[in-house]
Image (cartoon, helix red, strand yellow):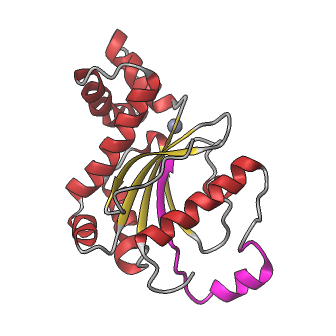
Amino acid sequence: MTKNQTPRDAFDLLMAGNQRFVAGTPEYPNQDAARRTEIAPSQQPFAVLFGCSDSRLAAEIIFDRGLGDLFVVRTAGHVAGTEVLGSIEFGVSVLKAPLVVVLGHDSCGAVAAACSALEDGQTPGGFVRDVVERVTPSVLAARAAGRETAEEILAEHIEHTVDLLLERSRVLAEAVAAGRLGMVGLSYRLADGSAQVVATRGLDAAVPTAS
Ligand SMILES: [Zn+2]
């Protein structure tokens, strides 16, 4: 990646890769031995990607990128605890990535589990409960705003996650305020592979939403 890349440059690069993936014309950039050798001494990823762990959401595949491009953090339902916050901050403050992406998707099991826990009061056991409980505030906020469809609840959860990162991390908030960092929330459609913009922070006002 080039140095001094802007948040907008990083966003455009990411979305161009998703469009290639959707169209079935991937270029598989940065996946060869030369790239492997080039970046072995140090990494300079252009984005931190924080997404759901879902096996259908493989980051470098769906954005048609390769080695050294994305600093990836994934948890079920993209719920953020302190290790997640620390990993994202590392990507921004140490590796200087100009973009943080929150990636959610339709038919997310964690979101569905949070919805059903609210409906029937049944919460899963073990640490799965912790995941579900961290999604629940998003579902409640969506309902309070009259946003009841699965798509609306998902969008709320993605945007809520973006804002949660900014509220909890001073490092991220200061980077956005200084214009060094952009944040984007993307909603991924499993069936067609497209990533739709549902929230932006610190990017230019007019971000086109892919259709
Ligand atoms: Zn999921």
Figure quadrant of residue 86: bottom left
Tell me, yes or no, if residue 71 can be seen here: no
63 versus 95 height, above or below: above
User: Does 61 lie within the magenta span?
Assistant: no
Residue occupying the point 52% across, 80% down = 44
- Name the spot of residue 116 as percent of width and height, x first: 41, 16
186 versus 30 height, above or below: above
The stretch in magenta equals 30-52
- Name the spot of residue 19 as percent of width and height, x first: 66, 53
Horizontally, residue 146 falls left or right of residue 108, namely: left
Which one is in front, 17 or 59?
17
Figure quadrant of residue 82: bottom left
Tell me, yes or no, if residue 32 can be seen here: yes
- Name the spot of residue 160 as percent of width and height, x first: 30, 42
Figure quadrant of residue 14: bottom right
Q: Quadrant of the C terminus?
A: top right
- Name the spot of residue 100 as percent of width and height, x first: 41, 62
